[in-house]
């Protein structure tokens, strides 16, 4: 079956940390022609999912297929796909490097487009952005159905650009008043974000403002691990620590995390970060004899 790629324009590029992290925004056309017929593009991507695009690679000079987790919500930005892209510093890194270069700015200025994979909607009357997961599994962060999440307590733990799917969650919930109504107090979402320095904080002001506006439903805990301003009023150091014991075994110290969320066993825990961070949390919980209500992670 032939794949369908719609041309999306790069409508915004924002540097978070020079040569390291960028916010990128793609805007899809309102319709696209397939087989001589124009189909409207309908955007109903679920928070916590990723779309597939074909950017260029610095090393290869060719377009490469890459998945990008969406950071905004389709509920209030139809057809505008935002994501956060970092330089992975991997030996064979290709597209992650390209996104940090001036070539991308020139690409945007020239009005060039990035192909984004589309699917036909079930009725075959419209095109929809491809989503990397259509069902909730332990290895993805697709948000629960709208009749479930308003009664849940979430703990989101993000390492660096791992905040991306959580931003989509929070923005979606905020647009729906966190599920609050006359009979429901709504969801509670505690967001723990770990980055190296304050330059790498993503949407810091927005998250502060959300916490101030929805104090009963959202709290924000940014943590800097390597350097911080002299007036930094949030967390410092690692949220989880590995301690090697005399017998050579590793003990995972969760005290920094438990200081933020002492009732972690009452939370639906969601993590986005490295496989090592995922292992540290699950191992630490097991060592401490703590079991959360549920645990799902997207790890790389």
Image (cartoon, rainbow, N blue to C red):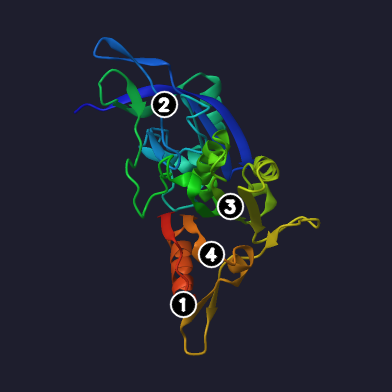
Mark 1–mark 4 distance (CA, rounded to whole Å): 14 Å
- Where does the image place residue 106, in percent across and percent down from the top left? 55, 25
Task: Look at discs 1 and 4 and give the one toward the viewer.
Answer: 4
Quadrant for the C terminus in the image: bottom left
Marks 3/1 in contact by CB < 8 Å: the verdict is no
Residue 228's image quarter? bottom right
Asked if residue 86 can be seen in this view, the reply is no
Residue 264, numbered label = 4
- Where does the image place residue 144, in percent across and percent down from the top left? 41, 45
Mark 2–mark 1 distance (CA, rounded to whole Å): 43 Å
Nearer the observer, 159 or 92: 159
Please state if 54 lies on the left or on the right of 103 as rendered. left
Mark 2–mark 3 distance (CA, rounded to whole Å): 26 Å
- Lower position in the chain sequence, tag 4 or tag 3: 3
- Lower position in the chain sequence, tag 3 or tag 1: 3
Task: Look at discs 4 and 2 and give the one toward the viewer.
Answer: 4
Residue positioned most to the bottom: 247
């Amino acid at each position: 079956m032939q794949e369908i790629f719609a041309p999306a324009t790069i409508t915004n590029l924002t540097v978070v940390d020079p040569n390291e992290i960028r916010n990128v925004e793609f805007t899809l056309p309102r319709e696209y022609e397939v087989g001589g017929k124009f189909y409207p593009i309908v955007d109903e991507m679920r928070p916590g999912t990723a779309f597939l695009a074909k950017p260029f690679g610095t090393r290869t000079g060719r377009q490469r297929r890459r998945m990008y987790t969406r950071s905004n919500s389709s509920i209030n930005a139809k057809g505008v796909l935002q994501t956060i892209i970092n330089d992975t510093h991997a030996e064979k890194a290709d597209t992650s490097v390209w996104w940090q270069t001036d070539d991308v700015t020139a690409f945007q200025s020239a009005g060039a487009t990035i192909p984004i994979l589309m699917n036909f909607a079930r009725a075959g009357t419209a095109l929809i952005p491809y989503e990397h997961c259509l069902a909730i599994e332990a290895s993805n962060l697709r948000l629960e159905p709208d009749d479930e999440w308003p009664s849940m307590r979430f703990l989101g733990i993000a390492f660096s650009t791992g905040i991306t799917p959580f931003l989509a969650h929070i923005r979606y919930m905020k647009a729906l008043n966190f599920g609050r109504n006359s009979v429901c107090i709504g969801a509670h979402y505690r967001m723990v974000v770990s980055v190296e320095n304050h330059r790498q904080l993503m949407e810091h002001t927005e998250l502060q403002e959300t916490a101030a506006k929805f104090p009963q439903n959202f709290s924000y805990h940014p943590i800097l691990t390597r350097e911080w301003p002299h007036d930094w009023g949030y967390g410092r150091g690692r949220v989880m620590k590995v301690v090697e014991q005399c017998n050579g075994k590793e003990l995972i110290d969760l005290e920094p995390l438990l200081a933020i969320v002492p009732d972690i066993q009452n939370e639906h825990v969601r993590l986005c970060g490295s496989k090592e961070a995922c292992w540290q949390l699950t191992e630490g919980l097991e060592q401490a004899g703590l079991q959360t209500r549920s645990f799902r992670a997207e790890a790389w």
